[in-house]
Image (tube, rainbow, N blue to C red):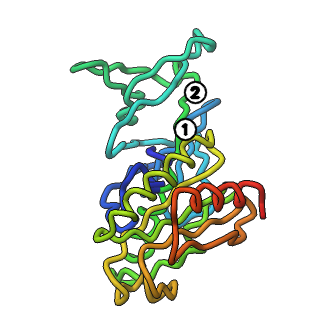
Amino acid sequence: MRFLVTIFLGCMLSVATWADTLKAGGKSYSGMFAGYEKGHLKFQEWTASEPLKVEMRRVERLKIENPSPVKYTLSGAPKKVLTAPFLGIKNGAFLFADGENELRYFARQMGRIEVKIDYQAFMAGAQQAAAAEAGGKEGPLRAKDMVVENQVTVIHFHHDGSPGSTRQGNLAQRLCEDSRGKATYVQVLVKDGDDPVAKANKLRSLPQFWFYDRRGALSSKLADRFTEDDISKAFEAARKGR
């Protein structure tokens, strides 16, 4: 339920070790809680293209691995928006944190729950899930697999040994954050040229910034030079679809 990419809040794509878990209809699912409305819970599995939509009566339990604040309403006051960390669903009750205490609401009391998706975290989890399905071996991650649908995507192949990588990465992330949900910043840590990610994307130098427009087309790459002006212009070009 941390749907953003740095997918996702400065976290690297290779370190997702958590997962929300859902048990419904006798089956178990791993991924991210994606919201609740009109008696239906939405849950995004790591390897699925579309979120599950599950009737509340079929939900046995939902565990949120890393609870974070969500916006929610109650059926008795649909226009009053409340905010609190969502803990999950247990024994038919929605659980929210209230300081050191818990708030409990049953389905008939719950209006809706809105979740801001952290796409970066989601992509990290999806990568890990795919690696597990492949026998636990983490395969190369290609840039096109990281592009977020219908958004400008800035993929930053980051190298720890470069101060410029950190500085310009912060700029690229800020531009995406200022886009009001229209752009996503994806940072991928690449150790050196022998890294599987470097080989998969044919990276001959580090760091690099790749810019994709909302259609998923590669707009530009910055490899040998990436001043603040270069980053800003490349971002603007991707935003305008050029």
Check the image and name the residue furthest to the left: 100
Question: Which quarter of the rendering shows the N terminus?
Answer: top left
Check if mark 1's residue and mark 2's residue have beta carbons within 8 Å.
Answer: yes
Q: Is residue 236 above or below residue 59?
A: below
Task: Choose the circle earlier in sequence order: 1 or 2.
Answer: 1
- Tell me the tag on residue 35: 1
The quarter in which the C terminus is drawn is: bottom right
Q: Position of residue 67 (x, y in %)?
A: 34, 37
The Cα atoms of the two marked residues, 1 and 2, are separated by 7 Å
Could you tell me which residue is drawn at 38 percent across and 53 percent down? Answer: 10
Disc ID at residue 112: 2
Q: Is residue 101 left or right of residue 96?
A: left
Q: Position of residue 237 (x, y in %)?
A: 72, 60
Amino acid type of the residue that numbered disc 2 sits on in the rendered structure: Arg
29 left or right of 90?
A: right
The amino acid marked with disc number 1 is Gly
Residue found 75% across the figure and 63% down from its top:
215
